[in-house]
Every structure is written in structure tokens, then in C-alpha cells.
Amino acid sequence: MFVPIGNTPRDYAWGSTTAIAGLLGTEPSGGPEAELWLGAHPGSPARVLDPALTDGAPDLASWQPTHDLPYLLKVLAADGPLSLQAHPSPEQARAGFERENAAGLAAGSPDRNYKDPFHKPELIFALSDPFEALCGFRDPAESRDALLRLAAATPGGAVLSGFARTLEGEPGEVLRRATEWILGDDTEVDLLVTEVVAAAQKLADDRDADTVRMLHAAFPGDPGIVLALLLNRATLRPGQVLYLPAGNIHAYLRGLGIELMAASDNVLRGGLTRKRIDVPELVSVLDFTPIEAAPLAPEHPAPGVEVFRPDVPDFRLTRVAVGGEVASAELPLDGPAIALCTEGTLELHGRSGSFTVHRGESVLVTPDEGPLGVASGAGTLFVATPNR
């Protein structure tokens, strides 16, 4: 069955007022449009748009998101930084959820870290040029060099210089210790943030100083400004994908992209936010291994088809570009699929018939239609499926 679906973009303050509407050809709301959710997550389940189908089509609001539809597809448009955050592994999520249940914490309690017993890995496909994010810890030696450059621009920055000197030793332990201190209650952290921000105003052509200025404009005085200097700043070009597994600390900074994640709501925050931060719990799930924030390499099973396959069974993202020399493509369905057209007009073919999808439209494809054919026209289609 082909079931046309849609939703209203979430109006988070960091959202763009134009990017989602510009991509999908819809009318801007006049306010921020941050995320368009296409899935069964109870936070904002997609709606069936064709009244003639409501009797026989799946009602996504009644689906179990991690069972019936184990992923959530989004269009994300950030005009400013999101909070620093990380997500637990399946084992951590299950243990944390059971622990908080046993403690008697209500489902909506502000003291909860775990809203459900599931993990929440995610990926982002860049549409804008650039799409920028903070992603994972970098080698602390790089952070030390950045902090020393900032210290040199601010004579008398004793706290800044002193903190830079602490970033020596075994990388994982150094990063753990620094994170706990930055997010703790030491009043010296406020002085460090002040010195870092003052120094950044004096370094015009410095990438780390640019990060500080951006974050200070959005979250003045926030300790996450300093924590960000321990992380990689990733700049994606259109078509590149960043994968964020369990334990990866990250924050999207600005840009438009297609986001795909496991259907969970477990977020542990680490700064750049006015929401609660549980430092011990955050530290318990973080992976302090330094990484390079390299794009996820795609598979190319056929002309015009790119498949981005992470190391989890919940989801994979396929981008199909049809037109010119590529007349058609065929995709296997390993479960229910959600297809979003971002350019042109395309004809989708399944076992029961066909369905035409235009720019800005999305459709749920039940697995009995597979394999899914894409042809007849020119356009771009993003398809989310389980990764089985």
C-alpha cells in the first residue's frame, strides 16, 4: 500500500524560518521551522493525508515506533546551535529506563534521563553548503593547541592557560576529567568561559575562535562553549553524511539536512542548553575515545542510488536520483519504508500498482509492495527503511 503522509514542522527556536519551506516548496509559517517528523514517534506522529485511506491505511499514531517503525525520518533546518548531547547504547538505555522505573519516577518527570528503553543512533545527510556540527572528542593535543592560541591573544588569561596545561596524559582520562570539571560547579569555570570568549573576539581568522563566537552569541556564559573546544568541528558539503553512534557527543550548529534516527527519545545533554544536565549520567554514556569526524561512505548498488548503512539494524538511508541517463531504479524493502521527494516528480511502482510523488510530498510504503521501483520523470527521493 502507498499511503501519503505529512506533518507540521516543529517550531523549536533554533529552527530556520525559510529552509524547510524552500526545500519542499511549501508556504512558510512565519515562525521557526526546525524539524519535520515523518514516522510513528508519539512526540509528533505523521498523519495520513488521504481521507479515502483512513479506514484501510496504517494509523501511525497507534504504531509502536520501535517495533512497527523502528526509525524516525526528519527534515532538519538549524539557524543556530542545538544543545550538546549524547545518546545511550541499547544496554545503557534499558538499564537506565528500568532503574528510573524502579525509583518511581513518573513518565513525564523532569528528573528522568530515559524516556524509553531504546538507543538513539542517528545520521544527518547534508543538503546545505555547508552543514556544520560538533561531533565527538578530538585529540586533546589539538584542543590544547587551540586553547594556547586563545591564551596568547589575551595576556593575563591565567585560568585559560592553566586549563590548557591540564590536557596532557592518556587521552580518554584527560577528556573525562576535563568534561566533569567543565560541567561541574567549580566557579573557576565561569572565569574560564569569560577568558575564552574575550580571546575569541581578538582572533579573526581562527576556526576555534569562530566556534566560540557562534556559541557565545546563542548561549552567553554557557560552559558548553569551552567543552566545544574539546570536540571536532565537522563541515559537511551537500551529499555528505555524518553518523552519530551511541556515546558520541555532538551538536548541530547550522544547516539544512535529512536526519534519520532510531525511534527513541533518550537524550543526555552536555551544555548549550537551559535544560537539565545530569553530569554523572552523561559521563557514564560518553565515549571519550578521540575520533576524526569523517563522513560515512555510501554504497553504490546501482546508477543513481546511494545507500548509507550504519552499524545498527534500525535504519538505513537511500538517496535515489532519477533522470537523464538514469531512467529508473529498484530498491529492496526490508520493512516499512518512508519516501520523501525533494526534487521533481517521480513514479513509484510496487506489487499493487503505482503512486506519483511530487516535490515536498512523502509516502509510507508497506513492505508487501517491495521491491520499490522509482521511474517516470526526474527527481530526487530519500527513502528510509530498516537496515536488515
Image (cartoon, rainbow, N blue to C red):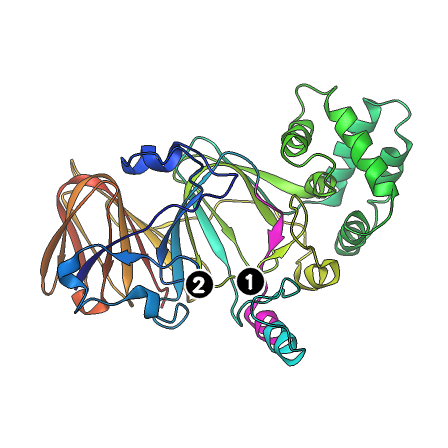
Give the residue pinned by disc 1: 266
- Left or right for 302, reference 98: left
In reply to whether residue 83 is colored magenta, the answer given is yes
The amino acid on which the numbered mark 1 sits, given as a three-letter code, is Asn
Q: Give the left or right position of residue 5, taking residue 285 as reference.
A: left
Q: Secondary structure at mark 1?
A: loop
Crowding at label 2, few (<14), some or many (≥20) Cα neighbours within 10 Å? many
Q: Residue at x 20, y 66 (%)?
A: 57
Q: Quadrant of residue 128?
A: top left
130 or 110: which is nearer to us? 110
Classed neighbour count for the residue bearing mark 1: other residues with Cα under 10 Å, few (<14), some (14–19), many (≥20): many
Of residue 150 and residue 144, the one placed in the foreground of this image is 150
Magenta-drawn stretch contains 291 = no
Provide residue 358's location: percent of width, then percent of height. 19, 42
Q: Is residue 42 left or right of residue 278?
A: left
Q: Which residue is mark 2?
A: 263
Residue 148 seen anywhere in this rendered image of the structure:
no
Give the magenta part as a residue range: 82-95
Q: How many labels sit on residues?
A: 2
